[in-house]
Amino acid sequence: MRVVTTAQPLDVQPTPLALLLLGREADPRSERGVECPGDLPSPSDPNLVARARAAKEKLGDKVFILGHHYQRDEVIEFADVTGDSFKLAKDAAAKPEAEYIVFCGVHFMAESADILTSDDQRVVLPDLAAGCSMADMATAEQVAECWDVLTEAGVAGATVPVSYMNSSADIKAFTGKHGGTICTSSNAKKALEWAFEQGEKVLFLPDQHLGRNTAVRDMGMSLDDCVLYNPHKPGGGLTAEQLRNAKMILWRGHCSVHGRFSVDSVEDVRARIPGVNVLVHPECKHEVVAAADYVGSTEYIIKALEAAPAGSKWAIGTELNLVRRLANRFAAEDKEVVFLDKTVCFCSTMNRIDLPHLVWTLESLAEGNLVNQIRVDKETESFAKLALERMLALP
C-alpha cells in the first residue's frame, strides 16, 4: 500500500534571475532592464501621432531621434536618421548640439551611443526593457571565466578577442582591455584579419554564426578550425588540446531572429518562387548562409535591393519589420521582396519600442524630465572606447 503524505510548504526564495524574468527586478549589468517609470499613454490613443509631433516640435534641435532598421514603421516615422547600430551611434556623435539622443533600438546600441557622444549629451532609451537576447548570452563574469580557462590552457597570450557590435558595454570593455577590437557584420573580415596579425587565435563574442561564417566563408578556414565555447559547461565544454588546436574560439551565442531561418526555409521559397534570389544576414546559421545566393549586413541588403533590376524576386532572411518596409518600398519598381520564412518573426525586444513609449519619452523631455537615461561608467567607457577606436582604425 502506498502512503501519501502532505508535503510542508517550502520556504523557497526566488533567485535574482527569476525575479528579473518575472519583471520584478532589474539587473544593471544585463541587457534586460524592466523599469519604465511613469504612465504611458494608451496604445489606442488616436492622438498619439499628433502628440509625438507636438513634443518633437517643442524640443526642436534639443532632441535627435535615431531609428534602427528593425523598428516599427510607427517609430521610424519620427526618426531623424535610420541605420544599423554602429551607423546610428556615429550619427549621434556627429550631432553635438543635440542635448538629448533618443535611441529607438535596444540597450547595447544606446550604450554605444553614450560611449561615443559627449558628456553633455544624454542618451535615452524609450523602454529600458528593450534588450538583446544575443548580448545577454555573454556576461562579464562568464567572459572573465572563459579567459581564465584560456589562460590555464596556455593559449590566452596568443588569443585576441573580437567582439561583435551586438554586445554589452562590459564585453566591449573586456575586449579593449585585452587588446581586441569590435566588429560589425560589414567589417568582420577586416577585424579578423587584423586580429590574426596580432595573435594566433581569436575569441569571437558573442555571435557564433557571424564568427563562423566570416572565418569559413570569407577567409577560407575550415569548420575544424572553429570550436564552440559553451559558458554553461565546465571549461566551456572544451579540452585544453581543442583550445590549442583551434584558430577560432566561438562563443555560444546567437541572434534569436536570424537563428530561426533554416535550409528548409531556403528550399521552400525556391520551390514557391522560381528564380528567386535568396539574400540572408551573416548572423544566420552556416548551412543557411551556404544555401543562400547572397550574404551581407543590413546595409548590404538594402543596397543590393536598390541595385537590383526591375522584375527581380528576392527572399530576405532578416528581421520582418525591415523586410516588410523594403517590400513596400520596392514594389513600385516591380521588385518582389518576401520574407524568407513562412513563420512571422519580429525582433521582440526591438518591438518594445512602440509609439506610446516614444510619446511618453518625448513629452517627458519636453517637460524637462529626463527619463530612461543610459549611462556607461567611466572605466567601462574608457576600455570600450579603446576597442571601438581600434575598429575605426581598420583599413
Image (cartoon, rainbow, N blue to C red):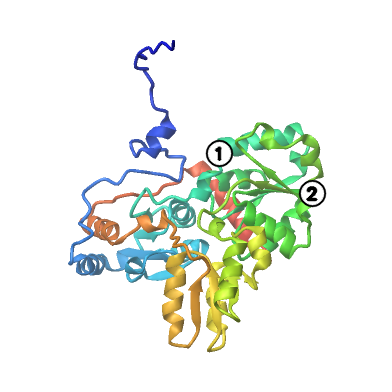
Instruction: Give the quadrant of residue 307.
Output: bottom right
Q: The N terminus appears in which quarter of the rendering?
A: top left
Measuring 56% from the left and 56% from the top, which residue is drawn there? 259
Residue named by callout 1:
140
For residue 100, above or below residue 308: above
10 Å crowding of disc 2: few (<14), some (14-19), many (20+):
some
Quadrant where the C terminus sits is: bottom right
User: What kind of residue is marked 1?
Assistant: Ala
- Specify whether residue 381 is in view: no
Q: Is residue 45 above or below residue 161?
A: below
Residue 208 location (% of width, % of height)? 63, 51
- The x, y position of residue 178, in whole percent, is 66, 43
Q: Which amino acid does the dot numbered 2 rest on?
A: Glu
In x, y percent, where is residue 48? 21, 65
Q: Which residue is mark 2?
A: 200
> Picture coordinates of residue 369 (x, y %)?
24, 51
Within 10 Å of disc 1 (Cα), the crowding (few <14, some 14-19, many 20+) is: some
Front residue (pair 340, 81): 340
User: If you read the primary sequence from the N terminus, does the residue marked by circle 1 or circle 2 appear first?
Assistant: 1
